[in-house]
Amino acid sequence: MKPSRRASIGLEKRERTRTSLIEAAYRVFARKEADAVTIDDIIAEASVARGTFYNYFQTREDVLKAVAASLSDQMNQKIWAQSVAIDDPAERMAIAIRQFLHQSIQDSTWGWVIVRIGLIAAPLSETIERGVMTDLEAGIRLKRFQVDSLQAAIDLILGTGLMAMRSILEGQTEPDYPEQIAKIILKTLGVADADAHVIAFKFLEPLPGDGME
């Protein structure tokens, strides 16, 4: 049954309000450590009533996870469009790792928000975990990866990526650090050194319009 025009307008308004709250929370998390952010900070930033906030989120952690999911899912969609035609799971994984790390170089605000809430909201979204799992399973099936524990491999990839992002943001790295990280992760998963190097340092097409406005 098709929703009425009034119902559709109501749904659109709710989605706009939820998006506005997520964007306001993003700006707050960009300025403050995740543990220091309060619901009052987000309400003030969004210029909404307290009741409006609670119509969409019950806790600070709820909105924190929504911000993390929004940021990571936007990136995931662009990365998926770039790598969907690639058969090699090792190359797909390297693209994802490199794109996330290069994005933190290009947009430090985006990067700090990811780092600040990454551990609290780990994994950043279900789509990230599902994407990593899909590539890992494909790599194991095709004998590209040698993995004893899927969960250990997921933690390795996500944890290394998060700490690498932090190092980038603190100015402790070289320009090709995303490629170095991608290479060492591939090697740890069982890809031969020379092969991992070629994959990690392959030309990387920039992603369009990254980040949250």
Image (cartoon, rainbow, N blue to C red):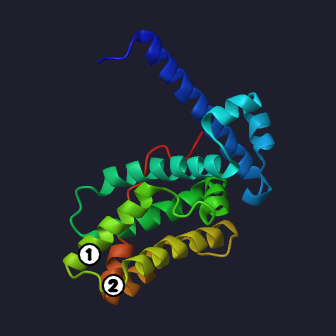
For the question of whether residue 192 can be seen, the reply is yes
Label 1 CA crowd tier, 10 Å (few <14, some 14–19, many 20+)? many
Badge 1 vs badge 2, beta-carbon distance below 8 Å: yes
Badge 1 is on which residue? 139
Disc 1 marks which amino acid?
A: Gly
Tell me where residue 5 appears, x and y as whole percent. Answer: 42, 10
Please state the total of marks drawn on the protein image. 2
Nearer the observer, disc 1 or disc 2? 2
Q: CA distance from mark 1 to mark 2?
A: 9 Å
State the mark number for residue 147: 2
Tell me where residue 70 appears, x and y as whole percent. Answer: 52, 46
Tell me: 77 left or right of 53: left
Residue visible at 24% across and 62% down in the picture: 86
In front here: 19 or 200?
A: 19
Q: Quadrant of the C terminus?
A: top right
In front here: 211 or 41?
A: 41
Quarter of the image for residue 87 reads bottom left
Element type at mark 2: loop
